Image (cartoon, rainbow, N blue to C red):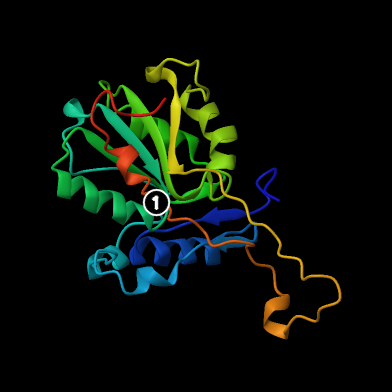
Amino acid sequence: MCAQNNMTVAMPTSPSNYFHLLRWQSHNPHHKPLVVFTPKSMLRLKAAASKAEEFTTGQFQPVIGDASVDPAAVKKVVFCAGKVYYDIEAERKKRGVTDTAIIRIERLYPLPGAELQAEIAKYPNAEKYLWAQEEPANQGAWPFIALNLIDHLDLAVGADVPHGERLRRISRPHGSSRLSVPPSGTRPSRSSWCVRCSRPEPRRPDPLNGLFARPGSESA
């Protein structure tokens, strides 16, 4: 549905950036639709908090860089959007990782190409670039990111691309849902007439295991 800048799609990760996004939308003279993804779990997440001065100063940031790492020591750059940022940050702190920068893409459409290029330029020694999400590979933002983000970053997608020029995905495997069809001649209850999986969903692997894998243990 997104084409020719006909709308704005955002996933703000902080209350202040969400506030500035709404302010920007109210003053936007173009009057384009705004789609915002805000999971309810972030309402109770203590890490997703903003100081009072962050509301009274500044503006909406389509990209939020990582000020907690030494740019010269960064070997891996992780792009993400939404709540998964806090999961990645918590895991990075837990493992004591210091060579990984996390870049939050707060506006998914239109992609902020200039801002992303400015952030990547801060890490001249980066060797790996990853997109991380909690959704399966065929859901979430990855299908869009794989087609569009590489145009702004001079990166490519594919197993035959060298690691330094390749954008890798860290997520759960491709997922699919199946319809359960009631046996012929039976009348299912009203509650079972909905779309559902025909078998229990297996335990989902943790995508963060691949994000902070030790050298030599990452999948291609």
The extreme bottom residue here reads 190
Percent position (x, y) of residue 174?
Answer: 55, 44
> Which amino acid is tagged 1?
Gln
Q: Is residue 214 left or right of residue 33?
A: left
Residue placed under numbered mark 1 in the picture: 61
Q: Position of residue 31 (x, y in %)?
A: 65, 61
- Work out whether 149 lies above or below 189: above
In this rendering, the count of numbered labels is 1
Of residues 203 and 146, the one drawn nearer to the viewer in this rendering = 203
Q: Secondary structure at mark 1?
A: loop
Q: Between residues 197 and 92, which one lies in front from this camera angle?
A: 197
Place residue 43 in its image quadrant.
bottom left
Quarter of image, res 167: top left
161 is higher (above) or lower (below) than 219: above
**Residue at 55% across, 27% down:** 151
Q: Which percent across, then down, holds residue 194?
A: 70, 73
Q: Residues within 10 Å of mark 1 (few under 14, many from 20)?
A: some
Q: Is residue 123 above or below residue 112?
A: above
Residue 41 higher or lower than 71, as above or below: below
User: For the point 57% across and 45% down, which residue is it?
Assistant: 110
Which of the pair 183/28 is nearer the observer?
183
Residue furthest right in the image: 185
